[in-house]
Amino acid sequence: MGAVLEGLRSLDAYPKPDEEQSVKTVTGAVVSVISHIIMLLLLLTNLTEYLSNPGLSEEIFVDVSRGSKLNINLDIVVPGISCQFLGLDAVDTSGDQHLQISHNIFKRRLNAQGQPIEDPQRTESLGSSKADEFKKTIEKLAEKKEGGEEKKEKEVKCGSCYGAESEDLKCCNTCADVREAYRNKQWSLPEPDKIEQCKNENFSEHLKTAFTEGCQIYGYLEVNRAGGSFHIAPGQSFSINHVHVHDVQPFSSSSFNMSHNIRHLSFGQSIEGKGSPLDGHYEIASDGSTMFHYYIKIVPTTYSALNGKVFHTNQYAVTKHKKVVSQSLLESSGMPGIFFNYELSPMMVRYSEVKRSFGHFLTNVCASIGGVYTVASIVDAIIFRLSQKASKVQLG
């Protein structure tokens, strides 16, 4: 029996020195206390992570889902252009038809310091297929100015379109009517002060604030789950021969500074720990009137929680490009604006919450404690050797 125990004793990988031969020092005590505190903190951290934060597995597979909608959440500030001269449009993949989309978009006027001037106003329509928001704004201003009798007189009055009358628009009773008539004829608009309707509505006063105010556009769009684009650009949008254009009269395209701050842009519900690439992004049109393009690749994503809840959302990657709009009459290089072109990836990502294994927890704890213990031993040995050499030098 004694031989067996002696044989086992020879396998001991952790020999213990005699207490008489061991040396205890103050520096060793300090290193020991600090290392034990670090071990305790690491143990608590691992325990908290094990109990509260589930693991996350990731899978990639072909997206075969169909028929769902795509939510576009946005919050964009254009500090150099008034809300009355900015519009938000969405077009389909062909680029020449406006989508019939649901939306909840608001515009908020901002002063030069970026502070709100008034309560946000909901945008009633998007694109040229519906009434022009600018026209509605001007009509509301005109109605407020005119009294009841004047309003009745206005309803029966047929104002002049200054030579731009057509079968669809024979009377121009507001400044917006005159602008639309000239737009239909593809004529340039005369000076607003020479148009009686614009003078009555103080149109010139609104022109003065066009570049002294800013605008915040925020809300969401709900579009078909297919590739497309949307953009924020100055002027009224309409189509000519299936070409999407903007009327910026009485200004020129080069007058608009499209510097902007993208406070938020996402395509669905946010995932914890997964940010949006464009959140907080700021662009400055330092070289003049500029087109800003964002090419977005959307990756459909499914998130499954431990409690069984599943929600569908999207992540995206983005490529940016910008170019200065030419002011030459002989060269057409686009118009200023913020353009977002998006397409969906054929692949889908699935995130699934999984419960962390107890073996993984033990492995992390052992690795943490063992690593701290080893490093503390090395540090203590170095300090002890240096102190011995210093004492020998003093004695010598």
Image: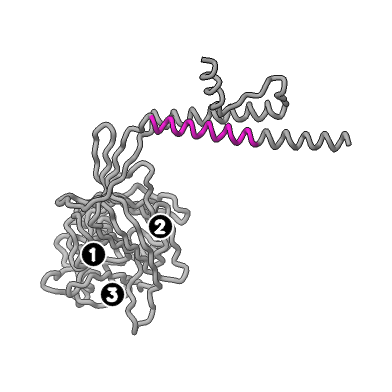
**Residue shown at 28% from the left, 47% from the top:** 59
Separation (CA) of disc 3 from disc 2: 25 Å
Of labels 2 and 1, earlier in sequence is 1
Residue 189: which numbered mark, if any?
A: 3
Of labels 3 and 2, earlier in sequence is 3
Question: Which residue is disc 1 drawn over?
Answer: 174
Instruction: Tell me the magenta residue range.
Output: 359-378
SS for dot 1: loop
Q: Amino acid at mark 1?
A: Thr
Residue 182 in the image, given as x and y percentages of width and height: 23, 74
Q: Amino acid at mark 3?
A: Leu
Q: Decide which of 80, 180 is in the foreground and name it.
A: 80
Separation (CA) of disc 2 from disc 1: 25 Å
In screen coordinates, is 244 left or right of 34? left
Which of the two marks, 3 or 2, is nearer to us in this view? Answer: 2
Asked whether residue 154 is in view, the answer is no
Q: Decide which of 333, 108 is in the foreground and name it.
A: 333
